[in-house]
Amino acid sequence: MKIKIKTRWITRWVFYFSIAALLLAMFCIGLTLANGDKSSFLVHPRSTSVEQCNADDYGVQWEMNFGSNPWYGARYEGPQPIGDCDNDGKNELLIGGRDGLLRIFEWDNMKQTYKQTHALHCPFYPLVRFNADGFAIGDLTGDGKNEIAVSWFATVYKWTGWRYRLIGWSPWIVWNGGWSTDCYIGDYDNDGKNELIMSNGARTDKVPEIVVYGWNGWRLIREASWNDPGVNGIVYMAGLGDVDYDGKNEIVCGSANKVVVLDWDNEKKEFDTTVIQKTYGWENYPFACVCKDSDMDGKPEIHVGYYSPRITIFEWNGTGYKTKFDKYWPGERELIEGLDVGDVDDDGIAEVCAGTNLVHILQWNGSTYTEEAVLPTFGALAAVSVGDCDNDGRNEINAGSVMVDHGQNFMSWVFKYGWTGQKNDTTEK
C-alpha cells in the first residue's frame, strides 16, 4: 500500500516550527540581555604586580575559582551580601555572577571553611536565565526576619525552615523594556518600614532609573519611582543613608554621568533631586554609591566608585555636599562597584575598602584618608564587601573579579585580618 504524503503540508509545518523556535530563542536571548550586565564581556590584557603589594597582616581565609569563561565565571556585587538570611542568628555570604545562580555560603567552624548550602535561580529557570546582578539581605516584610532580594525581575525569597521560597516578584521593569542592575533593602521614606529599592537601566521612558517596591502583606507593590529627566540613564549600585544629617534617609545614585541625592517629599509624594557631581566620559561614570560613616564622626559620608580606578568621598557641610577626598590609582583596573566601608583590622575604626585589581584599604587620620594596606588580588573587582562572614564578631573582606587578564581565572576571595590558618580553596566543577 502506498502512502501519499502532501509535501506542501510538511513544508508548511516545518516552516511554522522553525519560526516558533526562532522566536523562542530570540525571546530567551532578549530576556538574558535585558538582565543588564554591569560590565563588558571583554577580557582586558593588562598586567598586574601582586608581588609588590603589602598585605600586612591580612590572610586569605578562603577562595573559590570559577574558571576562565567570562560568560560564566565573572562575579557581581550586591550592596548587602552579608547577613543572616535564614534567621538562625548567624550570617551567610551571598555570591552572584554571570552563571545564573545566587550562591549562599555558610562558615563551617569545624572544618574552618565556607561551604555552599543553597543556590537560587530566577523565576522560570531554565527557560529564562537571568544573572544575579545585585542582591541584598534585609527585613522587607516587616516581620522581624530577613529575606533575600535579587535583581532578576524584582524577586524576594524567604527561608521556610528547609528551603528558600519565592514569596514575591514583579516583572514590570523587564516587561516594559528595562532591566535591573542592583537592589537595596532599606527605609527610603522614613516610615519605619523597609522597602525594596531597584536600580535600573531603561531603553524607553516607561521605566524609571529608580523603582521602589513596598510589601503589602502578601505581594510587592510599586509605590515610588525616580525618572532621570530627559535621558534613559542607567543606575548601578545605589546607596541609602542620612547623608544630610536631617534625621531622614536619602537615596544616593549615579545616573547619566552625575551623582544625585534623592530626598523623599512625603507631601508631594515624589523625590527632590540634588545633583552633587557631574562627570564626563564612560571612565568617570559613577557605579558604586555607599553611604556609611568612614571618618568616625557618627555621620555617614557618600562614597562613589567609577568605571576607572577612582573613588570620591563627599560630605554634607550644612549647606551642600563638598568633596572630602578624591583618589585615582593610575594604571590599575576599573573600580566599578568594588567599594565598601567597615572596620576590617579590628582597631575599632572604619576603613574604606576600594577594589581595582587590588584591594586598597584606607583609613581617616583626622585630616585625610591614608592607605593602610593593599591586598594582592587580580582582575577588575566588581565585588568588595565588608561584614562578619564567619560569625566571630570581626569583619572580613569578600572580593570578586568581573573582568580578568588573559590566562587568569575569575575568583572570589575572603580576606581576614590576622588570619594565619590554612587557605581553603574551592574550584567550581
Image (spheres, rainbow, N blue to C red):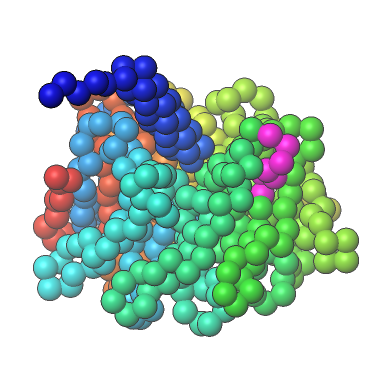
Where does residue 207 sit, x and y in percent of width and height? Answer: 68, 43
Where does residue 357 sit, x and y in percent of width and height? Answer: 36, 34
In magenta, the rendered stretch is: 204-210
- Classify 129 as above or below 118: above
- Classify 158 as above or below 200: below
Q: Is residue 10 left or right of residue 326?
A: left
Residue furthest to the front in view is: 1
Residue at x-position 73% and y-position 37%: 205
Magenta stretch: includes residue 240: no
Majority secondary structure of the magenta segment? loop
Q: Is residue 289 left or right of residue 429?
A: right
Looking at the rendering, which quadrant does residue 142 occupy?
Answer: bottom right
- Classify 60 as above or below 53: below
Where does residue 413 sit, x and y in percent of width and height? Answer: 27, 49
Where does residue 398 sit, x and y in percent of width and height? Answer: 34, 53
Residue furthest to the right in view is: 267
Looking at the rendering, which quadrant does residue 91 occupy?
Answer: bottom left
- Is residue 288 shown to the viewer in this render? no
Looking at the rendering, which quadrant does residue 206 occupy?
Answer: top right
- Classify 429 as above or below 104: above
Task: Pick whichever, 150 or 65, lies toward us.
Answer: 150
The number of numbered badges drawn on the structure is: 0
Residue at x-position 17% and y-position 72%: 109
Q: Is residue 429 left or right of residue 18?
A: left
Residue at x-position 36% and y-position 50%: 125
Q: Is residue 274 left or right of residue 286?
A: right
Residue at x-position 36% and y-position 69%: 164
- Is residue 201 shown to the viewer in this render? yes
